[in-house]
């Protein structure tokens, strides 16, 4: 099973409230923070929703 390395690069200031909740649900607290999460369809949906705020790398 692969994992996704997600980096938070843009602020949620001025974004929709549900985007802010998605960022917090992924575990981000600060800009330029990186988290690794197991790849799943649910996670990919969350990342797709905030794709303009994060960068994603696939890690094997």
Image (spheres, rainbow, N blue to C red):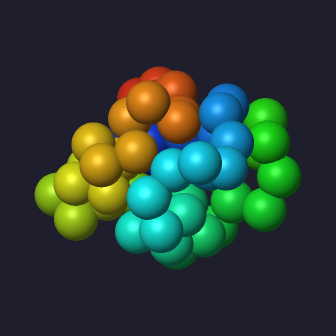
**Residue 27 falls left or right of residue 19:** right
**Residue 50 falls left or right of residue 40:** right
Front-lying residue, 23 or 6: 23
State the image coordinates of residue 40 (x, y, percent, origin top left). 24, 58
**Residue 20 falls left or right of residue 44:** right
State the image coordinates of residue 24 (x, y, percent, origin top left). 60, 70
Q: Could one spot residue 4 in this view of the protein? A: yes
Q: Could one spot residue 26 in this view of the protein? A: no
Taking the spot 38% from the left edge, 35% from the top edge, the residue there is: 51
Q: In this view, does 25 lie above or below 33?
A: below
Taking the spot 40% from the left edge, 45% from the top edge, the residue there is: 50
State the image coordinates of residue 6 (x, y, percent, origin top left). 55, 40
Q: In which quarter of the image is the C terminus?
A: top left
- Count of marks placed on residues: 0
The quadrant holding residue 29 is: bottom right
Taking the spot 53% from the left edge, 34% from the top edge, the residue there is: 54
Q: Quick one: which residue is furthest to the left in this view?
A: 41
Taking the spot 53% from the left edge, 36% from the top edge, the residue there is: 53
Q: In this view, does 8 lie above or below 49?
A: above
**Residue 56 falls left or right of residue 51:** right
Front-lying residue, 11 or 58: 11
State the image coordinates of residue 39 (x, y, percent, origin top left). 32, 52
Front-lying residue, 12 or 46: 12
């Amino acid at each position: 099973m692969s994992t996704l390395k997600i980096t938070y690069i843009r602020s949620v200031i001025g974004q929709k409230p549900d985007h802010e909740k998605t960022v917090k649900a992924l575990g981000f607290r600060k800009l330029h923070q990186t988290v690794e999460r197991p790849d799943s369809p649910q996670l990919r949906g969350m990342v797709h929703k905030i794709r303009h705020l994060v960068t994603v790398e696939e890690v094997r």
